[in-house]
């Protein structure tokens, strides 16, 4: 059960408005212009932040990078290898990586239940209005206060990639096997 609570805290700490996220690679397809990319990035960040706060899993999955989903699959597999993690997964009937991710996402979004729709939209607008820097044609960083959010261009869309900050949190929190730790670090 202690791992379940840690997971909830991790999902609260990352993947929601204003938190650090990272990316490694993006699709090779260039976007037609920086201005169009900026508009698309800000829309993706707004929708992703609002989806995270409202628990709209379908919309959130639309805007999250494949690499972030792969990290969550590795975490699920890693938890299955450690006794407390395996017990927590069985206790909560998380028999697939998708069920695990979906439940943690919805649980994390519950912290925003007390906010009005207008407040949630304002939070999402604030995140989307950060200072944007393009690293290359397929990767950008959006700075919001002291936090940054990485975005990658994949499948002809800009996506939020939370992999690097999430890896650090998961690796600090769970006693994964060395093999799992290596896979997560390599991702």
Image (tube, rainbow, N blue to C red):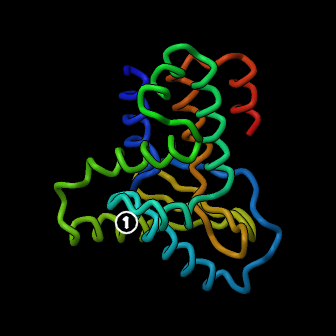
Q: Residue at x 40, y 41 (%)?
A: 13
The residue that label 1 is drawn on is 50
Find residue 136 and report its horizontal and vertical position in percent: 74, 66
**What is the residue that sits farthest to the top in this orientation?**
83
| Residue 13 appears left or right of 24 | left
Quarter of the image with the N terminus in it:
top left
Q: Residue at x 54, y 30 (%)?
A: 170
**What is the residue that sits farthest to the right in this orientation?**
28
Find residue 120 and report its horizontal and vertical position in percent: 27, 65
Q: Relative to 166, say whether 102 is above or below.
A: below
Q: Residue at x 44, y 70 (%)?
A: 47
Mark 1 residue element: helix
Find residue 149 and report its horizontal and vertical position in percent: 53, 56
Find residue 125 and report its horizontal and vertical position in percent: 36, 71
Q: Relative to 17, say whether 41 is above or below.
A: below
| Residue 5 appears left or right of 32 | left
The image quadrant of residue 18 is bottom left
| Residue 179 appears left or right of 128 | right
The image quadrant of residue 181 is top right
Q: Residue at x 26, y 47 (%)?
A: 111
Task: Specify few, some or many for label 1: CA neighbours under 10 Å numbering under 14, 14-19, or 20 or more.
Answer: many
Compare residues 30 and 97 and report the one nearer the observer.
Answer: 97
Quarter of the image with the C terminus in it:
top right
């Amino acid at each position: 059960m202690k791992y379940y609570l840690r997971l909830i805290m991790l999902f609260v700490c990352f993947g929601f408005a204003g938190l650090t996220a990272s990316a490694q690679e993006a699709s090779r397809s260039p976007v037609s212009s920086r201005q169009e990319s900026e508009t698309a990035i800000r829309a993706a960040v707004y929708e992703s932040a609002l989806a995270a706060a409202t628990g709209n899993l379908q919309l959130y999955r639309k805007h999250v990078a494949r690499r972030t989903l792969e990290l969550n699959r590795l975490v699920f597999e890693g938890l299955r290898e450690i006794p407390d993690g395996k017990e927590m997964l069985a206790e909560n009937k998380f028999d697939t990586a998708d069920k695990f991710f979906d439940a943690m996402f919805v649980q994390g979004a519950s912290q925003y239940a007390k906010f009005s729709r207008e407040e949630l939209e304002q939070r999402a607008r604030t995140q989307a209005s950060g200072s944007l820097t393009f690293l290359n044609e397929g990767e950008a960083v959006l700075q919001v206060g002291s936090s940054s959010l990485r975005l990658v261009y994949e499948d002809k869309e800009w996506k939020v990639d939370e992999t690097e900050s999430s890896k650090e949190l998961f690796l600090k929190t769970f006693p994964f096997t060395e093999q799992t730790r290596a896979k997560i670090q390599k991702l």
